[in-house]
Image (cartoon, rainbow, N blue to C red):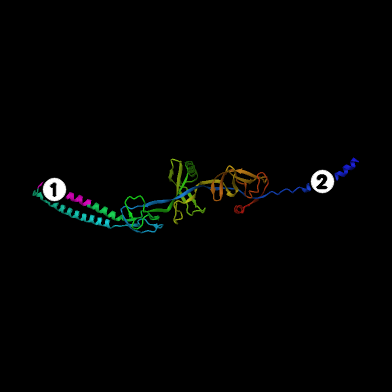
Amino acid sequence: MLKKIAYLCLPMGLLGCGAAAEGEPPPMPAPKVGTVVLAEQDAVIRTELAGRTAAYRVAEIRPQVAGIVQRRLFTEGAEVKAGQVLYQIEAASYQAAREQAEASLHDASANLDSQQAKLTRQDELIKLKVVSQQAHDDAKAAFRQAQANYKSRQAALKAASLELERTRVVAPISGRIGRSTVSEGALVSLGQVQPMATLQQLDPIYVDIVQSSQALLQLKRQLAGGMQSGRARVALKLEDGSAYEHPGVLQFAEVNVDPASGAVTLRAQFPNPDGLLLPGMFVRAEVEQGVRRRALLVPQQGVTRNEKGQPTALVVNARNQAEARLLQVQGTQGKHWIVTAGLQAGDRLIVDGLQRAVVGQPVEPVALAPATASVASKQGG
């Protein structure tokens, strides 16, 4: 009886086991990820720093004589040339003073001629012993006094001419002139605090870059090891993220150190023929520090940051599993990070489908060309 019950239960148990096996879901396929194979190549090391533009030269236009402004002879915001007349100050009184000085010079010249003639006669008479030595000495002294008076009147005429010339306020340098602080009819005076206008030379133009003195020392060492010239090339990114057309050079001769904070101001010089750069603009300066031989250029879309802010990447290992790597980077080149540790040539870097890859889990790698990898990253994998 027991054997019969066992035989009856056996098929039912087998049926139950089979139903459980058939109800399990099939295993999920490994997610597809796009990869690129890393290779060594030479890389230009660049460091991106914040900067601000500054005028190459600044001239404050101030009056050198007192008077009423008769005319303003420039357009505000326009380009002016060195020597161009900017203002005309009323010149009538200065013209009269020059004419008076010129008349005084003529009078002194006539007196000098007269005294010279007297001295010449005295020279002849003293030889004949017709006049006394005292009379001859007096004639000589009068001639010298007339000479001194003539030179004094010459200097007075030169000063009066200079004062008259200064009623024409001219541009000391070429550049762009700002707004005028005075108008026709305004009284200006010698030594006034407020300038009449400000003139700035913007071609070339400076970019001032502030960083720590420690970073400056590191930059100089990198330049010494990677470049032959002491003047590093610099590229600019404008406020809207676009690249500036003209490259510049870094001038270490213009370094200033703030004694209070220890911050260093580096100065780069850029050509500005189109006047696109204006003083006070915030820019990003990319400084070329040198060339790193046999470096790894890693696409930026394949690098992320962990909770500590450290750069990390995912690679596909020999078992086709996602593997995390902690990286060390040294600058950028284009849209790539220059990686110095954490990756090696031949690694299959995941650049597409990072959100689907789980560390330690299998993945299905799909090889991508560099251009395809860039497009895939923009599409979000």
Residue under pointer 1: 138
Where does the image place residue 114, in percent across and percent down from the top left? 15, 54
- Front position in the image: 264 or 343: 264
181 horizontally vs 221: left or right: left
Task: Assess whether residue 135 is covered by the magenta stretch.
Answer: yes
The answer to which quarter of the image holds residue 340 is top right
The crowd level at tag 1 (other Cα within 10 Å; few <14, some 14-19, many 20+) is few
Mark number, residue 16: 2
- Magenta span: chief secondary structure: helix
| Nearer to us: label 2 or label 1 | 2
**First of labels 2, 1 by sequence position:** 2
Q: State the residue in front, 168 or 84.
A: 168
Q: Quadrant of the N terminus?
A: top right
Residue 213 percent across, percent down from the top left: 47, 41
Query: Residue drawn 86% across and 44% down?
Result: 9
Question: Would residue 157 appear left or right of 263 to someone viewing this image?
Answer: left
**Circle 1: residue type:** Asp
Residue 156 lies, in percent from the top left, at: 24, 52
Mark 1 and mark 2 in contact (Cβ < 8 Å)? Answer: no
- Packing grade of label 2 (10 A; few <14, some 14-19, many >=20) is few
Residue shown at 88% from the left, 44% from the top: 8
Give whichever of 258, 354 is nearer the camera. Answer: 258
Q: Residue at x 80, y 47 (%)?
A: 19
Whole-angstrom CA distance, mark 2 to mark 1, is: 150 Å
Q: Is residue 117 left or right of residue 58?
A: left
Which amino acid, by three-letter code, is at mark 2? Gly
Number of labelled discs?
2
Residue 218 included in the magenta stretch of the image: no
Q: Secondary structure at mark 1?
A: helix
Q: Secondary structure at mark 2?
A: helix
Region rendered in magenta: 132-152
In the rendered image, the residue lying farthest to the right is 1
